[in-house]
Image (cartoon, grey):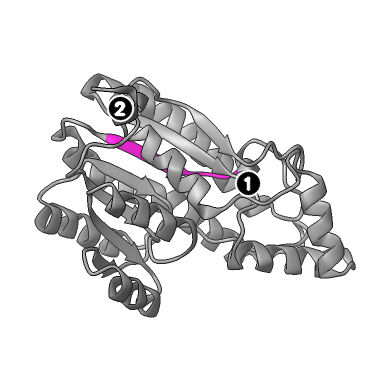
Amino acid sequence: MSMIERMRPRPGLRVLVTAGASGIGAAITRAFLEAGASVLICDIDADALAAFAGEHPAVTTLRADVSSEAEVDALLDAAAERLGGLDVLVNNAGIAGPTGAIDEIPLEEIRRTLDVDLMGQFLVLRRAAPLLRQSEAGAIINISSVAGRLGYGLRTPYSAAKWGIVGLTASLAKEMGPDGIRVNAILPGVVRGARIEGVIRDRAEASGVSYAAMEAQYLANISLRRMVEPEDVAGMALFLCSPAGANISGQAISVCGNLETI
């Protein structure tokens, strides 16, 4: 096998991507489809699922909220039935959560952020693990954030969840390594798209500055002075599931242009 071939995932991988109908999840899904994988995606947005499936007929879709144990159970049952098993799990689902001081954020918003961003990954993992143990190329990619290695004022629920994902990843890599399953986290930075636009807008309002000023502040904190594209994160996901990534496990890998602070 040439080095170029080693950089590509083998065709036929059975892949589950949570929140795969838009943003980073959609970019990862497209990348795996292009690599010849069979892909099942879930999303909480039924309209987004329908639109994505219309553009990519090969994908299998199911509406699911990863914070619901019953819906996650149905999702993994669908993976076993429709894909015939599972080789790769991309734990991508998450929400931005609230922006505000710790004593001003409603408790229900804190709980919702932790339920989706952290507990949702646990719920998917506990059901995916038996399927992945039956694979000859088992890999888990948990999507965290640079907020999982840097403190993030006014975004404490989100940052706490993303730090939790890094700890979950490191621990699970030790637990599942003897089964031949690699577990890594990708930590995206400021990723171009609707979500970061909303985050910048909310933070600008909370800080009493304009959107343009807050956007400039975000870019100034990135060494490369540019946002990450969703396809940059997708490229890392493909690499981690390729033969070239066969001995990478337990890592939290930033794709952020070297975000210095947030």
Structural distance between the alpha carbons of marks 1 and 2: 27 Å
Viewer-proximal residue among 240 and 207:
240
Q: Can you give x and y, in whole percent of width and height, for residue 246 in the image? A: 32, 24
Q: Which residue is mark 1?
A: 189
Q: Can you give x and y, in whole percent of width and height, for residue 241 in the image? A: 32, 35
Q: Amino acid at mark 1?
A: Gly
**Magenta-span inclusion, residue 141:** yes
Look at 22% across and 24% down and name the residue there. 179
Which secondary structure lies at badge 1? loop
Q: Which residue is mark 2?
A: 6
Q: Amino acid at mark 2?
A: Arg
Look at 47% across and 58% down and name the residue there. 116
Please determine whether, in this image, residue 255 is positioned above or below residue 79: above
Which secondary structure lies at badge 2? helix
**Quarter residue 216 falls in:** bottom right
- The number of numbered badges drawn on the structure is 2
Q: Can you give x and y, in whole percent of width and height, for residue 5 in the image? A: 28, 30
Look at 79% across and 60% down and name the residue there. 215
Q: Can you give x and y, in whole percent of width and height, for residue 143 in the image? A: 47, 45
Please determine whether, in this image, residue 173 is positioned above or below residue 158: above
**Quarter residue 257 falls in:** top right
Q: Nearer the viewer, mark 1 or mark 2?
A: 2
The answer to whether 123 appears left or right of 222 in the picture is: left
Query: The N terminus is located in which quarter?
Result: top left
The answer to whether 125 appears left or right of 94 in the picture is: left
Look at the image and give the residue range highlighted in magenta: 139-145
Q: Main secondary structure of the magenta part?
A: strand
